[in-house]
Image: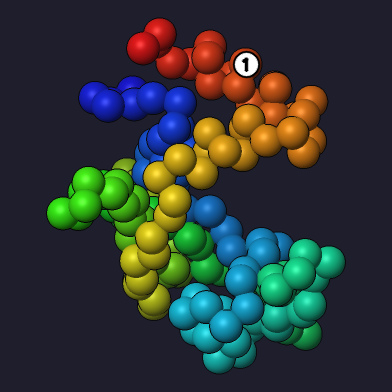
C-alpha cells in the first residue's frame, strides 16, 4: 500500500503496481487516441463489440499480438475551483524480457487521459449489478484500513 490509498483509488493503485496487461482481447473506445494507434498496427484487427461505442482487439490472420498496456503515472490535480482531476499516463509497448526477470518495454505509444476521481465508488455503489458491486466493496474493505 502507499500513503493516501483508500477505497476510491484501489484500481489505480493496483494498475500502477502491476506489470503490463496484454491488449489482446481487450475493449477499446472507438475513435480514441489508442484506437487510432492500434488501427494502424498490422498484427491487430479491431472488431465491433456488443458494448456500444467500443471495439474488441483481436489479431489479424496469422499474426501474433505481443503488446502490453502499462500504467506509468497516476496523478491528481485540484484546479482553482477546487475541482479534483485525476490523470493516468499509460503506454503501449512490446515487452523485452531481461535476465533478472524484470520486464521492460519498447514504448510504441504513450498518452494521458483524465478519469473521474470517484468512478470506482460510483461503480461499486450503483444499483446495477448489485451483487457484483457488493462483492467489490467487501474486497475493498478487507484490503483498506478504516478511514
- From the viewer's perspective, is residue 103 above or below residue 92? above
User: Which residue, as the protein is rendered here, is positioned at the far left?
Assistant: 80
Q: In the orientation shown, which residue stands out farthest toward the top?
A: 146
Q: Residue at x 77, y 38 (%)?
A: 128
State how the image is colored: rainbow
Measuring from the top left, give residue 121's x and y in whole percent.
53, 34
Q: Position of residue 10 (x, y in %)?
A: 45, 32
**Viewer-side residue, 116 vs 39:** 116
**Residue 4 vertical position relative to residue 11 in the rendered view, above or below:** above
Q: Which residue is mark 1?
A: 138
Q: Quadrant of the C terminus?
A: top left
Q: Quadrant of residue 4?
A: top left
Helix, strand or loop under label 1: helix
Tally the marks.
Answer: 1
- The quadrant the N terminus occupies is top left
Label 1 Cα crowd, 10 Å radius (few <14 / some 14-19 / many 20+): few
Q: In x, y percent, where is residue 44?
A: 65, 81
Q: Viewer-proximal residue, 119 or 15?
A: 119
Asked where in the image residue 96 lies, by quadrant, the reply is bottom left
Amino acid at each position: 500500500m502507499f500513503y493516501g490509498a483508500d477505497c476510491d483509488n484501489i484500481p489505480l493503485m493496483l494498475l500502477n503496481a502491476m506489470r503490463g496487461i496484454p491488449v489482446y482481447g481487450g475493449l477499446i473506445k472507438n475513435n480514441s487516441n489508442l484506437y487510432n494507434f492500434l488501427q494502424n498496427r498490422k498484427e491487430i484487427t479491431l472488431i465491433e463489440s456488443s458494448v456500444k461505442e467500443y471495439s474488441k482487439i483481436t489479431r489479424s490472420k496469422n499474426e501474433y499480438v505481443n503488446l502490453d498496456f502499462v500504467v506509468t503515472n497516476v496523478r491528481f490535480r485540484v484546479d482553482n475551483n477546487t475541482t479534483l482531476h485525476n490523470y493516468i499516463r499509460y503506454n503501449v509497448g512490446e515487452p523485452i524480457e531481461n535476465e533478472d526477470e524484470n520486464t521492460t518495454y519498447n514504448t510504441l505509444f504513450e498518452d494521458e487521459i483524465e478519469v473521474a476521481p470517484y468512478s470506482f465508488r460510483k461503480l461499486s455503489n450503483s444499483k446495477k449489478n448489485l451483487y457484483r458491486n457488493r462483492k467489490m466493496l467487501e474486497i475493498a474493505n478487507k484490503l483498506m484500513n478504516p478511514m
